[in-house]
Amino acid sequence: MTTSGEQATGESRPLGSYDVIVVGAGFAGATVARELAERGGKSVIVLEQRHHIGGNAYDRLDDAGVLIHQYGPHIFHTVDQRVFDYVSRFTTWNGYSHEVLADVYGTYLPVPFNKQSLRLAFGHERGAYLIAKLIERFGDEKKVPISELRKEADPDLVEIADYVWENVFLHYTTKQWGKSADEIDVSVTARVPVFVSEDCRYFTDPHQGLPTEGYTKIFERMLDHPLITVRTNVDARPLLDLSEPGVVRVDGKPYAGTVIYTGPLDELFGCRHGRLPYRSLDFVFETHDVDQFQPRGTINYTVSEDYTRITEFKHLTRQELPGKTTIVREYSRDYDPESGMDPYYPEVNAEVQAMHAAYVALTEQLPSFYPLGRLAEYRYYNMDATVAKALDLADALLEENK
Ligand code: FAD
Ligand code: UDP
């Protein structure tokens, strides 16, 4: 095992001889693998197509020695004590609280849009008046999804809603999702509600921060178990023969063990019900010879630029490295598997959910085959929700096996 997250552990033996095959070494796969090995005594093989473990949470040192997140900025945050305790078995935390500013024509406004943003956008006096109106309508310290605020009829609330929609959500959402912001499911923008508060943190969860030694170390520790074998650089699809309905063939024989799959389901079934749409991202990294590039971890470009946001990793990781810093710009685009892109965001809507359900139905015809995680379940999960789902699945499987 190396600190770059590359792994080839365990002995070489036929795939079909393992009790459990886990596809994908992200939070979903690593959690369920660890649980089934540790609590269930199962032999588990984890197959990962990338050259490293960690899924999209993978981090590494770049050429300048800056710890970067290869697949975009990841801030761990949760209200779920069970998940926090579980992940904390494999790491300590650096105490970072994420803060984001929106660049609105050169003025930085805190996001989620809050009392400070209102004063900056509308001036102190008018801002104070509008804050009082928000408190009167929704209560102090309340979070209000922009879709709810936009339903209000009071002219002052309409003014706030229009301002926030135009300057924070409209262009950013169009860039991020490649379609009109009004077509996006309201649950997406509800992730970043207007917050009637002075609190400038992006997340208010009681547990938040970054792993002190980085995410990749968490995965190395999770997968470091005598019953777990990890193979990187292995695409599982050609190894799982699903051509006969109701049968999983491995090594040419029907497989009697459990398969847990954390990749996109459509590709597993030859896209026979259509392609599940995902958004992908281009990450453009730059290292600068300065201590600090920008005043906060992330600046969202909500009214300008082709990219959505710039993140400077040293804020997040609290790495001490004078004279060097690395940033990443994120450019969003449709996922096209033919172009070597990665799928990052499920594009949740009713029609696509139905297509996804048709793929889940195919997996249900297979003995002991479980889709798990953000890609396979086609849900906009954060890391904590992914771990929670993996712990639930492990509990259910271990209960069944009693
Ligand atoms: P993944 O991490 O995607 O892991 C799936 C793994 O399966 C991948 O490594 C993939 O290579 C592998 N795989 C797929 N198909 C195959 C195959 N056929 N054979 C072998 N291997 C395969 N969450 C937060 O909580 N906080 C954040 O700040 C945050 N920021 C994010 C920023 C970005 C840009 C993105 C894209 C996501 C962010 N997330 C964040 C969400 C977080 O990344 C996910 O919740 C988490 O990674 C989901 O874990 P997973 O194991 O389901 O999927
Ligand atoms: N969003 C926006 N402007 C912002 C921040 C968020 O329009 O400044 C919208 C956008 O549609 C985005 C969604 O809110 O996709 C969820 O934002 P979040 O920061 O949770 O996205 P992620 O970090 O998952 O990319």
Image (cartoon, rainbow, N blue to C red):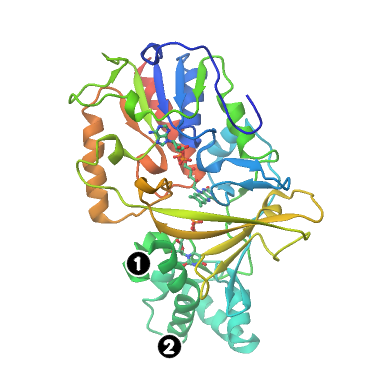
Which residue is found at the position 54% from the left and 33% from the top? 53
Question: What percent of the width, then of the height, locates residue 214?
Answer: 66, 40
Q: Which of disc 1 and disc 2 is earlier in sequence? A: 2
The front one of 7 and 374 is 7
Residue at mark 2 to residue at mark 1: CA–CA distance: 28 Å
Q: Is residue 132 left or right of residue 44?
A: right
Mark linked to residue 179: 1
Q: Residue furthest left?
A: 245
Residue 327 placement: quadrant: bottom right
> Does residue 342 appear left or right of residue 284 in this picture?
left
Nearest the viewer among 399 and 279 is 279
Does 41 appear above or below 325?
A: above
SS class, disc 1: loop
Q: Which quadrant does the C terminus fall into?
A: top left
Q: Is residue 286 visible?
A: yes
Is 114 left or right of 174, judged from the image as shown?
Answer: right
Q: Name the residue tied to disc 2.
A: 155
On-image quarter of the N terminus:
top right
Residue in the image at 45% along x and 72% along y = 171
